[in-house]
Amino acid sequence: MSEVQPLTESSVIEYVKQREVYDKVFRRAEDLQAEQITEGNVNLLFRVYSAAAPKEKSVIVKQALPYAWRYPDFKMPVDRSRIEYEVLKIEGTYCPEQVPILYDYDEERHILIIEDLNRHLVMREGLMQQKRYPHVDRHMGIFMARTLFYTSDLYLSSGEKKAMVPRFINPVLCKVQEDLVFTQPYIEHPNNRYTPKLEPQVRAIYADDDLRSEIFMFKERYMTHAQALIHNDLHTGSIMLNEEETKVVDPEFAFFGPMAHDIGTYFANLALSYAAQEYHARDPQERADYRAWLADLIVRTWNIFEEEFLRLWEEEGNEDWPSPTFRRKYMHQLLQDTAGFGAAEMMRRLIGLAHVHDFWTIEDEDVRATAESLGLNIAKAWIKNHSKVGRIEDIVEMVVEAKPEI
Ligand code: SR1
Ligand code: MG
């Protein structure tokens, strides 16, 4: 592995000046400034902008170091930068409106230069402020349908698909997810962290081998079901949006895995936001209204996803699956698996290593415990009942009916 020189706020300016983007975006402006962005867990990130036109002349510089930026003990190959570059190109082919502009990829220094989405907000933060996004249902439903369909065996020929899989094996980042999402939250592990009042619920999870066996069924599916090129970290921190546009970022974890892991991860993070409104939406009526909007967003997103996915299958699918009954079974399985993978994502964000802003920001431990307890019980309902799910409304009913234990 080549020696990696981490960029700094001053060296990143010199770096940008040597790249094509200095002409293309900055028109060789002399007043470049840089600031480090400390969101995210994995990469070194900078915003580089012209002081005179900070919104228009601005880019994001993203460098992959041989470890996760926030968790240096997690060694991660710099090749994830190449994976991110290739996946952004593929996603951009099928769903250009939901993908940021890619300006540059430096194979030697593992650096990507991408569009600065400074007109957009991280979705997780927007949800914490009860913002409503009128088009995010369509944008995310279409994004998931297209990226998943066009990289699956329903569209690609058997040979094309098999030739693609090895380019996205991504073993180290997959192992991170296997451990953090599907293993450690279900055993006593030094990486786990949780609000002390959750102790009885956490103990009950460790002792519930039926629940753990279901999670491990999904872990095995995650590890073995190379169904489509999935984003593999599709939480609301990987989505930047405003009222008009939605952009999905950070696909460095991508590999050929189960589609429902992406859909479930996204829905899980909407459900986590639903639980965290216990704190973020202070007024009870406002909380109830916003929770209803979030619950409905899950339903609308699935419906748009399903409609678009089936339309693509009908119009552009290959000839290898000539059975309407198979299509129905396939979509049904996808929906049930969405609940299972979603449960794993919720649990790991509440009792595993990598927590989320929705809950971190709740300083009052009692309120945080109540919100997190609700989140855990939604997850528990999803994993226990995934095989009974017949409609998206069943998944949402479990959200609405769950109660905190604290
Ligand atoms: C050590 S990386 C922790 C988490 O951050 C990423 O966003 C992935 O979700 C990973 O599990
Ligand atoms: Mg990320």
Image (spheres, helix red, strand yellow):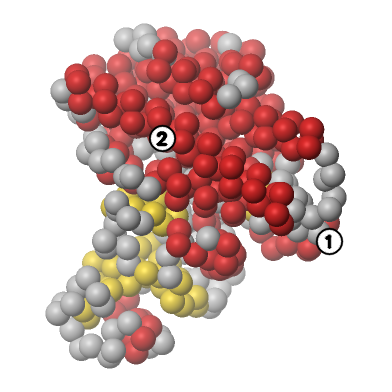
Residue sitting at x 74%, y 37%: 327
Write the residue at 33% across / 45% down. 134
Residue lying at 66% horizontally and 19% vertically, measured from the top left: 387
Q: Position of residue 71 (x, y in %)?
A: 42, 48
Query: Seen in the image, is 189 located left or right of residue 296?
Result: right
Q: Nearer the viewer, mark 2 or mark 1?
A: 2
Q: Amino acid at mark 2?
A: Leu
Q: Which residue is mark 1?
A: 159
Q: Is residue 62 above or below residue 29?
A: above
Rendered view: 377 above or below 300: above
Label 1 crowd bin: few (<14), some (14–19), many (20+), radius 10 Å = few
Say how many tags the image has.
2
Please determine whether, in this image, residue 26 is positioned above or below residue 220.
below
Instruction: Say which of 23 and 306 sits in front.
Output: 306
Q: CA distance from mark 2 to mark 1?
A: 37 Å
Residue nearer the viewer, 284 or 8? 284
Residue 153 position within the rendered picture, expressed as x and y whole percent measured from the top left:
76, 51
Which type of secondary structure does the marked residue at label 1 adopt? helix
Pick the quarter of the image with the N terminus.
Answer: bottom right
| Residue occupying image coordinates x 38% and y 48% | 135
* Helix, strand or loop for disc 2: helix
Question: Label 2, on which residue?
Answer: 297
Name which residue type carries label 1. Answer: Gly
